[in-house]
Amino acid sequence: MTDDPYAKLKEDQGYGICPVHGYGWRPGRNMANAPEGLHCPWDGSMHPDEFMAYLEKPGTWLTPTDKNYKVYISVVSDEPETMRHITSMTRRPDEGRPDSQYNREWLTWEEAVERHPEMREEYEEHLSHVASLAPSHPWHTDTHWIQVCPRGEERESKFYFEHLTEEQKRRFIDLLNEGKLNLREPGFFYRRPFFIAAPKVAE
Ligand SMILES: [Zn+2]
């Protein structure tokens, strides 16, 4: 027995241990509409090998942030039609009436899973979340009404640069210098990743 509350997260689940934070890489989605993959339980970062592989695929975009250690990554999914839940209600909405603002139907979680079996995993996560909140937040246990929409082609996750190996940092810089990285607004790293030196300025 151990008293360490994080002991479970430190276990290797067969995917290795994050060398930076000492937690076992976890499979799953982690962010609401992220691609399935491995992530670090410490900060939710995508696994560096998956990050680097996505950089080489068409349709991948990076969104710079104001932090020198973080970037968002958007990737293309081959299952755009699978569903996810986008909002939920603790009280029963007007039966059979779509939400007037979004024109979407309200479903119970049970109905949603029946129509869209791929939502089962998300439903089970919801149930365990609710179980962890009760009884201090009893109203959460009534959150059964949801709206769903297709996940769409684009999935977004986040990456923390400290997970890159030295070799991966060099590869990232090469891709950047070769203009092979698609960067969203403003189109360049307004805050340079910490491992990239300032450009040389002509004197
Ligand atoms: Zn980590």
Image (tube, helix red, strand yellow):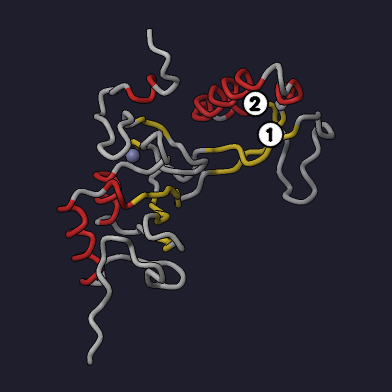
* Ligand 1 within 8 Å of the CB at mark 1: no
Indicate whether 44 appears above or below 4: below
Residue under label 1, please give it: 146
Residue under label 2, please give it: 109
* Badge 2 amino acid: Trp
* Pointer 2 local density, CA inside 10 Å: few below 14, some 14–19, many at least 20: many
Residue at 77% from the left image edge and 44% from the top image edge: 99
Residue at 74% from the left image edge and 20% from the top image edge: 138
Residue 196: image quadrant is: bottom left
Looking at the image, the residue that sits furthest to the left is 167
Residue at 29% from the left image edge and 51% from the top image edge: 54
Res 91 label: none
Looking at the picture, how far across and down is residue 21, in whole percent? 32, 36
Residue at 38% from the left image edge and 72% from the top image edge: 188
Q: Quadrant of ligand 1?
A: top left
Looking at the picture, how far across and down is residue 167, in whole percent? 15, 53
Looking at the picture, how far across and down is residue 42, in whole percent? 40, 36
Q: Nearer the viewer, residue 150 or 53?
A: 53
Q: Nearer the viewer, residue 61 or 200?
A: 200
